[in-house]
Structures are given as structure tokens and as C-alpha cells.
Image (cartoon, rainbow, N blue to C red):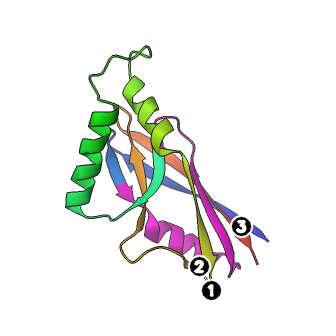
Amino acid sequence: MIYSEYINCRTKGYNDILDITDDVKRIIFRSDIENGIVTLSVTSSTSAITTIEFEPGLIADFRKALEVVAPVKGVYNHKSNGFSHVRSSLVGISKTIPLVSKSLILGTWQQIILVDFDNRPRIRKIFVGIFGE
């Protein structure tokens, strides 16, 4: 069986990080699927989906690490927002998480996040596909 929905998120850009775990759980609840996998994919080349412990210290550390790897003021051939494309490519636009008894298999301190790397606010669309039985 397959079930899918979209999550729409309004972001601020420049490493705006949103915890979307509860949104995903609500979609799982609406589905008839108990066991399988949940696949998330953001339809953007300047944002990403990953997991993290969603707490202020780690969020700040994540932002600092991204600045080291792909600095906003770096030299890019793609002039306007090259840093955001590089960051998206490195972190990735999708994530797949196991589903058992209607529960996401995540660690105790693990949340699903959307990160918008672009240089302006956006509305981001995230596909959530649940595959299983």
C-alpha cells in the first residue's frame, strides 16, 4: 500500500531550521499503513531534509559547520546563491525512515528537520510517501 501527502512550510531562508517531526507523525496517523518506510523529499535545490537533535546548541553548531563547509561569502560560479545549492547537495533533499506499528524508528533525541539554505524566505513543499502494509 502507498499513501502520500505534502507538507508546506513557510521559511525565512539563511539556514532556517524547522522541526517537521510532528507533521510527519500526523500524516502517518491519517494513513492506513502500520509497517513500512516513510520517505520525505523536499522539492527544492536550495533546502534539505535530515535528522538532528533539535535543541539550540546543536542547531547553532550545525549552522557553524555549514558556514565552514560552504560559506555564504564564498566564491561560487553560481553567483546569487551558490552556497545554498552546495549546502543542499551536501546534506541531501530526502530521507527514508523505517515505520513499525505506526511509529517512526528514530532515536530518543532525533527529530526530522527541514533546512532552508536559500537567501530569502520561501514556501517549501515536502513530499511524504509512506510505503508498506
Which x, y percent locates residue 92?
51, 45
Foreground residue among 56 and 2: 56
Quadrant of the rendered structure where residue 35 is?
A: bottom right
Q: Secondary structure at mark 3?
A: strand
Which residue is tagged 1? 101
Magenta stretch: give its range.
18-47
- The correct choice, above or below, for 34 with respect to 87 in the image is below
Q: Quadrant of the C terminus?
A: bottom right
Which x, y percent locates residue 59?
27, 55
Foreground residue among 12 and 52: 52
Question: Mark 2 or 3 closer to N-term?
Answer: 3
Q: Quadrant of the N terminus?
A: bottom right
Question: Mark 1 or 3 closer to N-term?
Answer: 3
Magenta includes 9? no
Which residue is tagged 3? 3
CA separation, marks 2 and 3?
A: 11 Å
**Type of amino acid at the residue the image marks with label 1:** Ser
Which residue is at 39% across, 15% downward?
79
Query: Is residue 133 shown left or right of residue 17?
Result: right
Residue depth check, mark 1 versus mark 3: number of the one nearer the observer:
1
Which residue is tagged 2? 29
Query: Is residue 127 shown left or right of residue 131?
Result: left
